[in-house]
Image: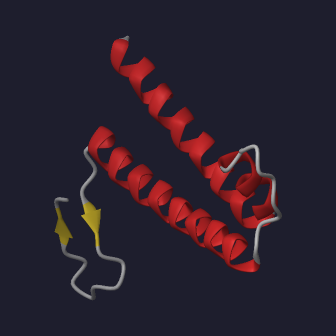
Amino acid sequence: MLEKALIVLIVLLLLLTLSYAILAIVKPTVVWKREFISKKVRKPSDFDLLLTRVSGAFLILACFVLAYVFLNKVTNVKLCSAFSTAKMCFDV
């Protein structure tokens, strides 16, 4: 029972992180303003928005890698190389 709750929690956290990363790419101004709230309000520069988008892209990549590793560990599946002509399977 505890394992299922932990799986649900991890999947929920990955989905929340993924949604935040997508928002960082689509609307970087909103994410930038949320991250850097201060008394001195200034508009983000183009470089600030670019870095916010790049960080969103890295977060998306990290979410997919973590989801892949997590699902692989939970399901204990042997992965087969799709590009291998011998169809050799290996453990990760």
**Residue located farthest toward the bottom when viewing the structure as drawn:** 85
Image point 28% across, 50% down: which residue?
77
Is 22 above or below relative to 20?
below
Total marks in image = 0
Quadrant in the picture for residue 56: bottom right
**Residue located farthest toward the front when viewing the structure as drawn:** 40
Direction from residue 48 to residue 86 in the image, left or right: left
Direction from residue 8 to residue 27 in the image, left or right: right
Foreground pick, 62 / 70: 62
Direction from residue 79 to residue 42 in the image, left or right: right
Name the quarter where the N terminus is drawn: top left
**Residue located farthest toward the top when viewing the structure as drawn:** 1
Q: Position of residue 76 (x, y in %)?
A: 25, 44
Name the quarter where the C terminus is drawn: bottom left
Image point 40% across, 23% down: which residue?
6
Is 7 above or below relative to 58?
above
Image point 48% across, 27% down: which residue?
9
Foreground pick, 13 / 83: 13
Is 38 above or below relative to 51?
above
Foreground pick, 27 / 39: 39
Direction from residue 51 to residue 5 in the image, left or right: left
Image point 45% across, 59% down: which residue?
62
